[in-house]
Amino acid sequence: MSIYKIWQIADENEFIVALADYVAQKCESGDNMAALSAPERIFFITQTCEAEVNNGGFAQFLTNSSGDLAGELANAFQTIGARQTAEICRRALGLFGRELPAAREERCELLDVSTDAATQRL
């Protein structure tokens, strides 16, 4: 569907779904983020986070390729005015005591160790 047709969708949920599909297709589901404009990038990051967290929590977001964008997460939510969500993201990512690696394999190794430590604190 063209972006022009998407902007004509009146139903809010249908609009968000269509726009998310359009942006994901444009950036090859995150494999080509350079194809996105700055607003599209923010939209992709926030929508991807929401989908992943709603489906499997922050663990799913961070262990999937979507976690490659974790360093931009809080800023993206702050940019769209979702200040509380930005703060939740900062706090969740801050639990690791360091910036998470962008490389998925390194991040997953760190998460395995950090998950064990976090479980012991509970």
Image (cartoon, rainbow, N blue to C red):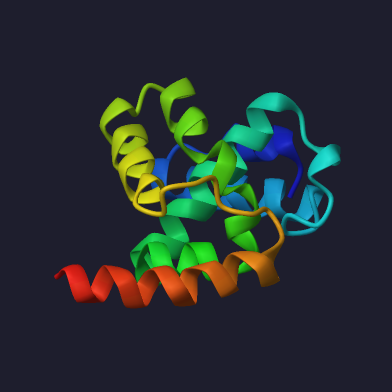
Q: What residue is shown at x 26% (from left), y 32% (from top)?
A: 84
Check the image and report above or below for 13 versus 107: above
Q: Is residue 41 left or right of residue 32?
A: left
Extreme residue in the left direction: 122
Of residues 37 and 114, the one drawn nearer to the viewer in this rendering: 114
Q: Quadrant of residue 41?
A: top right
Q: Position of residue 5 (x, y in %)?
A: 68, 39
Identify the residue shown where x is 70% and y is 46%: 23
In the image: residue 43, left or right of residue 50:
right
Query: Residue 96 versus residue 93: which sits nearer the camera?
Result: 96
Q: Residue at x 41, y 48 (%)?
A: 97
In-front residue for pair 43/109? 109
Residue 36 falls in image quadrant? top right
Q: Residue 122, image x and y in percent? A: 14, 70
Residue 37 lies left or right of residue 94; in this view the side is right
The correct choice, above or below, for 51 with respect to 38 in the image is below
Count of all numbered marks drawn on residues in the image: 0
What residue is shown at x 71% (from left), y 60% (from top)?
103
- Residue 91 screen position, x and y as percent: 31, 42
Q: Where residue 6 appears, x then y in whole percent?
A: 63, 40
Task: Looking at the picture, tell me which residue is in the foreground, 105 or 86.
Answer: 105
